[in-house]
Amino acid sequence: MKIAMTGVSGNMGREALAQSMTLREVEWIRVLLTPKKKNNKLAKRLRKAYGEKIQIVRGWLHDPVACERLVAGTDYVVHMAAVIPPRSDASPEASEKCNREGAMCIVNAVKAQSPQPKYIHISTVALYGNRNEKHPFGRVGDPLLVSPFDHYAMDKLYGERYCLDAELDCWAVLRQTAMLHPNMMHDNISDGLMFHTALNAPLEWVSSRDSGYLIRRILERDGKGEVPGFWKKIYNIGAGKKGMETGYDTFKDGFGIIGGSAEKFFRPKWLATRNFHGLWFYDGGELEELFSYQRDDVHEYWKEIGRAHKLYALGKFVPRGLIDLFLFRRLRNHPNSPYRWVKNGDEARVIATFGSMEAAKALPDRWEGVKLIAKGDFGDYDAMRDRENARLLDHGYDESKPLSEWDTEDMRGAAAFRGGELLSEEMEKGDVYRKLTWRCCEGHTFEASPYTVLKGGHWCPFCMPAPWRFDLLAEKMPFYAQVWYDSHGKEERYLYGFDEEGNATARREK
């Protein structure tokens, strides 16, 4: 078995490489490392650890030549590389180069091979956009409403769409949920990003260890021919109920290892109320049934992080005022903090994050009266996390029909639910990967496969952000409206984007 991997310097990729190397069937794994100096040491460590079983290509993901060298002669390509927040917020160019252009280059390189290797594309939960207590459960096929100004999610959306449109011979898209890793605390204390987390955002945490183990299990089981129905589908990577929390719970677990809590360190008005991302996966069990990879419990993993970083325990003995002075005051005044946006009058980001400047300033300074999913203010918390009680979104077609029975009428109904129409006169029943021609509510004509639209949740590529026009599209698209209006008013009608200097803008449309 010959494998190519990107992203092995990241948390998931590091685990996927280490765990896949334990497979006896693996002849070698070839990895792509950028030419940065910091990767010189990593290259030496990899060669020392794996010897002849590791092959290293130095180059950039957006370089077609480097990608061709990486995938040549492989049986599998696992694309995990990503520029994630907060770096993607600070450097939109890096996000575009990696998450969009890099994905395109790796897909092109796979497609150029003969025979083509099997391709695993790691996508993200961020594509689904903001959720709250009204629709906390989501699944493949839900609308993709990436949050305004989120460069990472936007570029990952383009990258995933390119993969689906490429008509590769054998592929799988895995949308990764929120991921816990050993350096979780360290990586989130240098930026205002933590304040983007809405208290009632549904979050399903999976560990980097389990994520890497999933890749190993895919290679292992598919190599033995045990999962023939796995390919050419989109899946959600989750952790099940033992990983399901909210933003509030996450602060409780994380700050708990330094003797604190959300109430101790935060004020409610510092935190975003929307424009985040997160889901509890209704269909997260599909991958678990195939590969049995979900092992870690979110609460136990946080404790493990605390044991691995004993210095954090000293926080229990430091007065709250000192922690606030030297840590949280700096973070909430960071340029990427919602508190700073309100303070400086960054109206576009404030509107996207709170609804309006008035709504942001009206948020309470104290915790009394703050309604929290985690405290049962919207109903029994355990019952809410039970998938049997899930309130699911409508996808605009008869989902009881198997893919082999999809026909022209299903496509017409789905198109109408999306405010558009099917232009193709007919579809061969069950041919879900052959592209059809569609028209969106804005009059754009485009091609996409039935699977991309109905199971992927994708729609018009010309209406993809930026600019973000979901306020306007939801007026014409029941598919979007059913979830967009959970956290947005019908009267808002904003067009979100960036000016020539890269500053966020929000223009009210008539």
Image: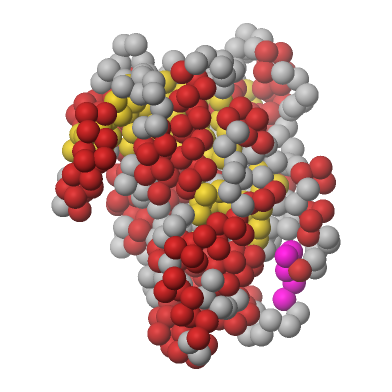
The foreground one among 486 and 50 is 50
Quarter of the image holding residue 414? top right
- Please state if 92 lies on the left or on the right of 47 as rendered: right
Please state the extent of the stretch shown in magenta in the rendering: 370-374
Whether 252 is among the magenta residues is: no
Question: Where is residue 55 shown, x and y percent of the image?
Answer: 23, 31
The structure residue drawn at horizontal position 61% and vertical position 52%, both measured from the top left corner, is 297
Q: Is residue 104 visible?
A: no
Along the horizontal axis of the image, is 399 left or right of 360? Answer: right
Residue 126, compared with residue 17, is above or below; it is: below
User: Residue at 39% across / 32% down in the picture?
Assistant: 22
Figure quadrant of residue 333: bottom left
Majority secondary structure of magenta residues: loop
Q: Is 137 situated left or right of 315 in this image?
A: right
**Image-quadrant location for residue 477:** top right
Residue 63 image position (x, y, % from top left): 22, 35
Q: How many marks?
A: 0
| Colouring used for the render | secondary structure
Q: Would you place residue 58 above or below residue 404 in this image?
A: below
Quarter occupied by the N terminus: top left
Identify the residue at image location x=34%, y=11%.
Answer: 115
Q: Nearer the viewer, residue 53 or 2?
A: 53
Magenta highlight on residue 371: yes
Q: Quadrant of the C terminus?
A: bottom right
Does residue 413 lie above or below 426 as drawn?
below
Q: Position of residue 411 (x, y in %)?
A: 67, 22
Q: Residue at x 64, y 67 (%)?
A: 248
Q: Is residue 83 visible?
A: yes
Give left or right: position of 317 versus 60: right
Residue 255's x, y, as percent?
55, 72
